[in-house]
Amino acid sequence: MRQLIAGSRGSKLALTQTEGIIRDLGLDIPIKVIKTRGDNIQDVALAKLEGKAFFTKEIDDALLAGEIDLAVHSYKDIPTDLPDGITIAAVPIREPSNDAIVGAKSIEDLPLNANIGTSSLRRQALARHLRPDLKMLDLRGNIDTRMRKQAEGQYDAIIVAEAGLRRMGYPSEEYKPLDGDTFIPAPGQGALGITARADDTEVLELLKKLEHASTRMACDIERSFLTALDGGCQVPAGIYTEIDADGKLVEIKGFISSADGKRFLSETRIGKLSDGIELATGLADNLLRSGGDVLLEELRKGGN
């Protein structure tokens, strides 16, 4: 096999994820660090930036130019409309999809008017829906930076993905997982997506060994929900999927909210796993018809 090059963002988490995939492949693959727009802009909340693909465009460009041969992404960062010529070649087994709170036992346990750090509109909306008194503050930076800021007392608590904490080796006593049925995750959260050129048969064949079928199916279902909403990763919407042990049934819970959490639409559907994408699309369409279309349009115009 030819010498391959992997592309990655420069954050510690991104590099840890990429190094883990390289170990699983059992090959000596150097990593090319690529700065993305999302990495370069640290003083503005992502929700206030225009466009999508904040953490993938520059990596996609390098992939199409032949500068790298594969890239490891947090699945939720991958936009629903991939550039022509790029495919998600493998979706490995998933870490937990739920969020976690650092600095408190639960959302309910937080003191009145507590300051919560998160850069995610989804997390802000969910926290405000559960606790309207909470004060939401933007939080950017890698996992280590976020944890340090919370430890220094800049926030009473922060909310991050549990998967990132686990991959970075943080001990479980330093955070509390939030129930995904109540604090609904982002589509694809906890999963990785490995992208490659769609015509690079050698790399596509290599990456097949990392594929985890049920994780791919869950992510496809969640991605179809986001596509039906025509939303990127920075909208207050989320979806939680549970596939039964037999791999035949799936339970899907999705939501759309106003940014302040006051107008909150949620629905659950259960059906055959083979109908999962249809179930998720129907759920999204029903939420939009129930007023979600108005909420998303207000958000696009800068309202609450």
Image (cartoon, grey):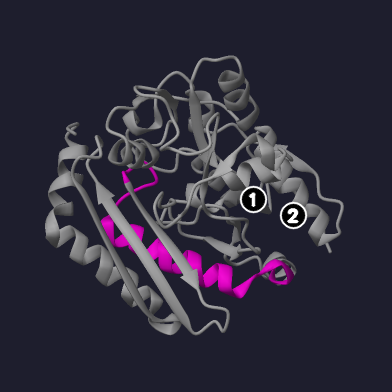
Q: What element carries label 2?
A: helix
Whether residue 227 is situated above or below residue 130 in the rendered picture? below
In front of the other: 142 or 2: 142
Residue 127 found in image quarter: top left
Q: Earlier in the sequence, mark 2 or mark 1?
A: 2
* Left/right of residue 82 with respect to residue 47 in the rendered view: right
The tag on residue 21 is 2
Q: In which quarter of the image is the N terminus?
A: bottom right
What type is the residue that disc 1 sits on?
Answer: Val
Q: Is residue 9 found inside the magenta-colored segment of the image?
A: no
Looking at the rendering, the stretch of residues picked out in magenta corresponds to 208-236
Crowding around mark 2 (Cα neighbors within 10 Å: few <14, some 14 to 19, many 20+) is many
Locate residue 60, reporting x and y percent: 54, 47
Magenta residues: mostly which secondary structure?
Answer: helix
Q: Which of 205 and 49 is in front in this view?
A: 49
Question: Can residue 3 be seen here?
Answer: no
Tell me the element at label 1: strand
Q: How crowded is mark 1: few (under 14 residues within 10 Å), some or many (20 or more)?
A: many
Horizontally, residue 303 falls left or right of residue 74, namely: left
Could you tell me the amino acid type at mark 2?
Ile
**Disc 2 vs disc 1: Cβ atoms closer than 8 Å?**
yes
